[in-house]
Amino acid sequence: MNSKIFTIFTSLFFGVFMGAVFLPAHAEQNNTANSGKAAYRPASLQPRLQFPAPPAAGVTTVLKKSGAELVFSAPPRGTYQEEVAIYKPVVDFLSKVIGKTVVYRYSDNWLSYSKDMTTDVYDIVFDGPAFNGWRIENLGHTPLVRLPEDFVFVIITKADNANLKQVKDLAGRLICAHAPPNLGTLTLLSQFDNPAREPVIVETKGWDNAYKALMDGKCAATVLPLKNLGKYDSGSTKQTKILYQHKPMPNQAFSVGPRIAPELYNKIIQALLSEEGKQATAKLRAAYAGKDFIPATSAEYAGLGELLKSSLYYH
């Protein structure tokens, strides 16, 4: 009898002891998994992206790394190879002008681009007026040079659409437009204060396609640059009517952040406007009709960051 009791007691003690040894490790593994933190991996086992291979989807990468450096970026428009071809001459030129290495950070999507921007990763940026306005107000950026033509957007519908008389009539209706944060789409959405009363965006790539989709009856309206409308609807009998015309906005610009000394601003401006600067930015300007840059001012972009108020990361 005593032997039997001793055997039971020994088994129970052994079970409690083993549980104390193994359960904490198991619990720690579960806690690590639930916390979303990855377990440690030696550096030699970490996956590495090797230039010049394009980055995987959703990944940003820097063109080159060399210790302390300044980071340049621009919106995700083309492939990695296409964007490097445009911006490598620019960052090489800026490195020479500033006297410090400037690297190009590529992003293949708006979310990663916006996240990096709003967390102050970028020192030099080339992009549109809404982003410039936001950085001026929130990150202390200063615009230096910009493309010369202003942006003027119009919201249009078919001329014979008697149901639509003003832009507010578009609430709940289908609108053929680029996905936000396209500037035209942002100007459209800025006319609606209540998210429950906004138009429904039918994502359409290209101004030509947006106009064609409207004329084909795929949507009630679209938003276009005014100069594009002049090309599409140029006949004596107009096929469209304008529901809203937004005030002119300055074009895309180079801005610099506070990690670049203000005494360098004028030097950078003059360099970008010089003949050597024109050569360095030739491919970039060719992508936007090829016109020369002009000096930019903060006042031109003041308040335009408000267009991003409903966009992720810019609240």
Image (cartoon, grey):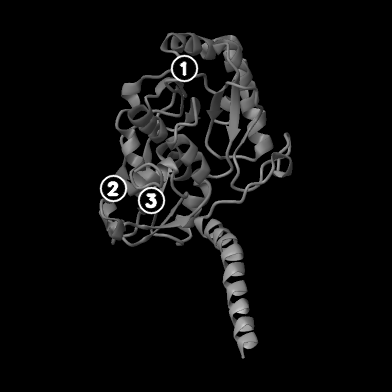
- The type of residue carrying mark 1 is Ile
Q: Secondary structure at mark 3?
A: strand
Q: Going 63% across and 28% down the picture, which residue do you hit?
A: 86
Residue 9: x %, y % from top left:
58, 79
Q: Secondary structure at mark 1?
A: loop
**In-front residue for pair 231/82:** 82
Say which label, 1 or 2, has the lower sequence index: 2
> To which residue does mark 2 refer?
191
Q: Find residue 120 and report its image quarter.
A: top left
Closer to the camera: disc 2 or disc 3?
2
Mark number displayed over residue 260: 1
**In-front residue for pair 130/176:** 130
Mark number displayed over residue 14: none
Mark number displayed over residue 240: 3
Dot 2 alpha-carbon crowd within 10 angstroms: few under 14, some 14 to 19, many 20 or more: some
Q: Going 62% across and 91% down the picture, which residue do you hit?
A: 1
Closer to the camera: disc 3 or disc 1?
1
Relative horizontal placement of residue 49, taking residue 166 as reference (left or right): right
